[in-house]
Each structure stands twice: as C-alpha cells, then as structure tokens.
Image: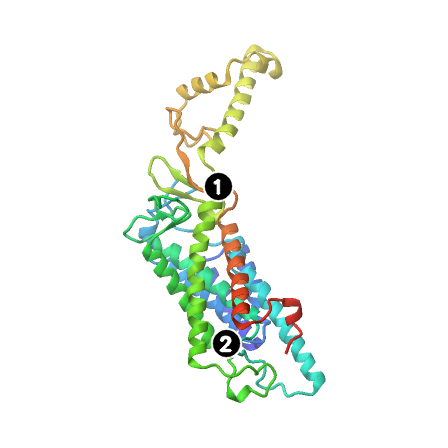
Amino acid sequence: MKAIIAIPATLALVYRAYSHKSLTPLGILAATLTAAAHAVHPWNLPFALLCIFFLAGTRVTKVKADVKVGLTLSSQGSSVLEGPRTHVQVLANSLMASILTLLHTYQLRTRHDMALSRGEVLEDSFCYRWGGDLLVVGIIANYAAVCADTFSSELGILSRSTPRLITSLSFRKVPRGTNGGITLWGLIAGLLGSMIIVAAALIFLPLCGENTLNKVGGGGGGWTFGRKATLAWGLSLWGALGSLVDSFLGGWFQRSVRDVRSGKIVEGEGGIRVLASIDTDSHSREHSEKATAGARANVLHEEGSHAGEKQSNPAVNDAEDSSTKDPYNPKDKHRASHFGDRKPTRVAESGLDLLDNNGVNFLMAFIMSFSAMALAGWYWEVPLNISNSICVI
C-alpha cells in the first residue's frame, strides 16, 4: 500500500480511537502496529479490511447502547457502558490476519524479485486470479469471521427472543450475554457483518481479467460472474459460521457467571475472566482465618502461631463473624461473596473456566482462517503448503 495513503489513514484511525475513547492507550499502540503490518502489503485489501472492521465494529457497539447497558452486569457489580477495548482485544481479532498479511507480503516480494531476474514486465501485474494464493482467502476469512462475531454479539443481545445455549443437548434458555447463547436475530446479524467484509474485499481485491492473462500472476483465466458469486457467498457463509464456532467455543471453554440477585450475566472488563463465588470464598475464608488468629493473639498477648493452634473450627468462626458483620458493606474488601445466609451471589451458568473471551476470539479466528484456506485449496486443487507457495508464480 502506498505510504501517502497508509500514513494519513492510520493517523486518522488513531485520532478517532483516541477522541471517541474506543481504545485504551495500549490498545491504540497495538492498533497502530497492526495497521503498519497491514500497510506494508502491496495491495490495499488488508488495510481496507482492517479499517472497515474497526469502523463497523465500533459503530455496531454503540447501537442501542442505553438498552444493552441494563442487560448484563460488569465484574465491578454495576451496569455500565462498555469501556475502551484493550490491546489484548485488538490482537485477539487481528493478530491472525496480521501474520497472514505479512506472509503474503513476503510471498509477493519474492515473486517480484524472481520476475525481475527474468526480465519480466511488472506494471499492473500480481493480480489475484481464480484459484490463486490461499493466504488471501485466510485474510478475508479472518475479518469476515470476527466481524460476524462482533455483529452477532452486539446485535443479537437485543433480540426479543430468549437466547438458547448451543452446547446444551436440550437447547435450554439462558440469560442474555451467556457465552454460547444464540438467537435467530444474532445469526442474521452475523451474516450481515460477514457480508460487509466480503463486499469490501471484492471491491479492493485486484482481480485478474483478460488484460492480465499474460502478466505475472495473471494466469488461470478471468473472473466470471459465477466465480465472483462463488467466492462471495462462500466467504460470507464461512464468516457467519465463525460466529457459531465462537458460540461453541465460548459455551464449552469459557465460563459464564450469573449474578444471583439480578439473574444477569456478569461480564469481565476487557474480556477477562469473571470469578464465581466458589472461587473467591476460599481466598476470603483463608484471609478471615489469618485475621481472626492475629486478633486473638493480640488480645491474649500470645504469639499468632500459638493462637492459631487454639482457634476453633474455622467454619464456625466464619459463621460467627458473618453474623456480626454487614455482608453488603462495600468498605469491607475481604467480605465473603455470599449473602448473610451463606448462599453465593455469583454462580457458574455454563462452560469450563479454560479460556477468557479474548482467548476464545483468537482461537476462533485461527480456526476459521486456516480451515478456509484448507477448504479453498481442496476446491481449487491447490495444496495448502505456505512454504512452497511463497516461491510459486
């Protein structure tokens, strides 16, 4: 991509992210590096897809934000607007595409050097032919999938129908915001997000035509309407499938925590894990036991270790402390995560606590990118071998 376009466009995105507080300072740094990795590509395609995903994603996040704010709880215990995205969230969605973009850049540069050594004309060459580089398919599939997932999450939560857990055999109903919960409107929104990316890809992708048949990279025939439709619908549906894959991964490997008092799902800021009461009670009880032992040692003028040996059943002591302390006192940083009746306030709704939201997003992007390249390679009868394809013209 030409520097005269890439530099002003990158600065404009950085300014927009800063002025709208869409990204944290580290998020802006990660986005700038990501934009640079996309801008070094000879084509405008990767950078354009990055910009469109960022603009569309931030815009759809603000759709009925006043309504979405009351549908879930933050990990801080209140309903708040979604904060700026972190560098981890930026990389979770774009790192896979950045790697593929850099690989394809190297692939094109290698072809460029080989063509120069042969004395071939390079002007208007290196277009994208039917059955061409699989890395390009992976780049488009990555952004189609992550955009579909963003649209599905941000718009699907507004559906009037109750979400159902995709990983449940009974397809049971779950609270809004549950990982793995899907609705029909969410699936439609995901397809819309995928189609936006694919439509932009067809606009910025330098497709080969009759005038490029005898030029470097221009073999394989031109792009007929049928071939364009095949690529467009194939990638659009594949991107929409990415939102379903994300739901499966989230339903299996990411734990959803529900607040017992409100019945709402608790979301971690920046996509991090949310602890349930069972996770925090053990730490709180351990701290309470140490504090009780120390207090009794001071009163009896004995060593804390001796007092600890004389203390009674920790469960009984904890119960006695709970009866005298206010369980809702926000100034008590070591209060147990339960009501006065010892019942937990946050319980696991679904999923295993193996990945956070960012881990799920990156895994989904990785799966959809490589599987799209594998499928395209099978359809076009092109072997999926990146190391060898770098030197192919």
| Residue that label 1 marks | 352
Vertical placement of 257 versus 294: above or below? below
Query: Badge 2: few (under 14), some or many (20 or more) residues near its Cα, within 10 Å?
Result: some
Please say whether residue 54 is visible from this viewpoint: no
Count of marks overlaid on the render:
2
Image quarter of the C terminus = bottom right
Secondary structure under badge 1?
loop
* Observer-nearest of 349 and 339: 349
Tell me the tag on residue 306.
Answer: none
Q: Position of residue 61 (x, y in %)?
A: 39, 57
* Amino acid type at image mark 1: Leu
Relative placement, left or right, of 192 versus 122 is: left
Task: Residue at 33%, 48% (x, y): give it.
Answer: 163
| Residue that label 2 marks | 205
Task: Residue at 53%, 25% (x, y): give it.
Answer: 286
Task: Residue at 52%, 29% (x, y): give it.
Answer: 283
Vertical placement of 165 versus 58: above or below? above
Q: Position of residue 213 (x, y in %)?
A: 56, 87
Q: Mark 1 or mark 2, which is nearer the start of the sequence?
A: 2
